[in-house]
Image (cartoon, helix red, strand yellow):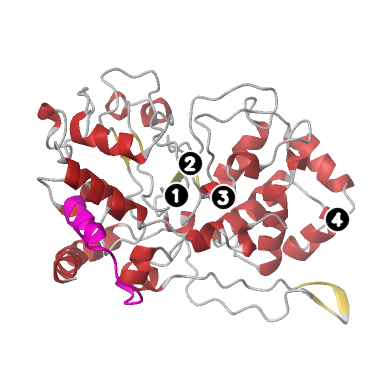
Amino acid sequence: MNTLKKYIFLFLSFLIVFSCVKEPQKEVETTPVPPTNPTNPTNPTNPDTFNPTPYQLAIPTLFAQYILPPVIPSNNPTTVEGVALGRKLFFDPILSGNGTQSCASCHAPQFAFGESTRFSTGIDGIQGNRNAMPLFNMAWNWDNRFFWDGRANGIEAQAFGPVVNPIEMHNTWPTAVASLQANAEYPNLFKAAFGTTNIDSVLVAKAIAQFERTLISGNSRFDQYLNGQISLTAQEIEGFNVFMAENRGDCFHCHGNAANPLWTDNLFHNNGLDATFSDLGLGAVTGNPADNGKFKTPSLRNLAYSAPYMHDGRFATLDEVINHYSEGLQNSPTVDPLLKYLNQGGVQLSVADKAALKAFLLSLSDDSFINNTNFQAP
């Protein structure tokens, strides 16, 4: 524990500085009013009065202690009614062109809201070229850029795109909205959540985004250890030491440390996967060649459930991921300078260090998250 406390102390000051730099530009939710009567969102004496119930996000202790509050847009406050609607929409295939695919088809709770296959397949049987990113702790993405390539600015934009993507749900928004409008339940649910029975694509995306902001994961064994609730094994502790040492795992530059419970910097890096690029990643979005081959840093939480790994799902196991950073790095013009051992192919971990690192990484998985009944299909 002494070594771990030392790392927390050393990096906490850095984290504070970083947090100040990353001050969110949007209104944030600090101390919301707890739900009072979720089943009756309207005034009983005036049924036309719109009075949604504020929703209190379940912010983990370590999040509250070490990082800034979540980013909540002022034009889409989180409410009990909005979250309930978003949850129903997330699991409902009604949004897809043929009524067979929902958001949860590619972002399933049992896989940490990711998928177990390498690539997603849309309603027309067309396969994409990216692995679906797991969804959790999205409200703490302060630069508000989503997807592997950062093409969506905000969770609402992230929720908006798949409905009309021809290799995903392959629908049109007018058709999707018409289906919702004709449904027996949805007009009243939108009335409760947004004060209108007139459904549109913006409100659909807002509702899904509200639900996605509630997908918070912060109760792994490592979290419980930091909170003084349990002990870790000697191998798991040694794995953390490997993770933090520049001459061993050298993982902390992009994935943070014990004072960053997100376990990602939420930035974009070329992590030495390829010498040449078939997928430009961020570069295809920005048009800047310096961004070619850069992809968003995924969180290291819930790796026990979210295989395969990387933006293209090329690694089927966590062992393959560790081997890549140990001895499989590829050089390219945009490779990240944080990969300090690139010229020797990687950090060259011993067998024991690899096993310890794997044990630590798995301690970041949160079974209470994937089994949370509030996150399952309604």
Label 4 to label 2: alpha-carbon separation = 30 Å
Q: Nearer the viewer, mark 2 or mark 3?
A: 3
Task: Identify the residue position indicated by label 4 in the image.
Answer: 185
Residue 45: which numbered mark, if any? none
Task: Identify the residue position indicated by label 3 in the image.
Answer: 110
Q: Nearer the viewer, mark 3 or mark 4?
A: 3
Task: Identify the residue position indicated by label 1 in the image.
Answer: 144
Q: Nearer the viewer, mark 4 or mark 2?
A: 2
Q: Do the CB atoms of the residues marked 4 and 2 lie less than 8 Å apart?
A: no
Label 2 to label 1: alpha-carbon separation = 15 Å
Q: Nearer the viewer, mark 1 or mark 3?
A: 3
Dividing the picture into quadrants, the one containing residue 56 is: bottom right
Q: Is 252 or 233 nearer to us in this picture? A: 233
Q: Amino acid at mark 2?
A: Met
Image quadrant in which the C terminus is located = bottom right
| Magenta residues, dominant SS class | helix
Residue 133: which numbered mark, if any? 2
Label 3 to label 4: alpha-carbon separation = 27 Å
User: Where is residue 215 drawn, in percent x and y?
Assistant: 54, 58
Which sits earlier in the primary sequence, circle 2 or circle 1? 2
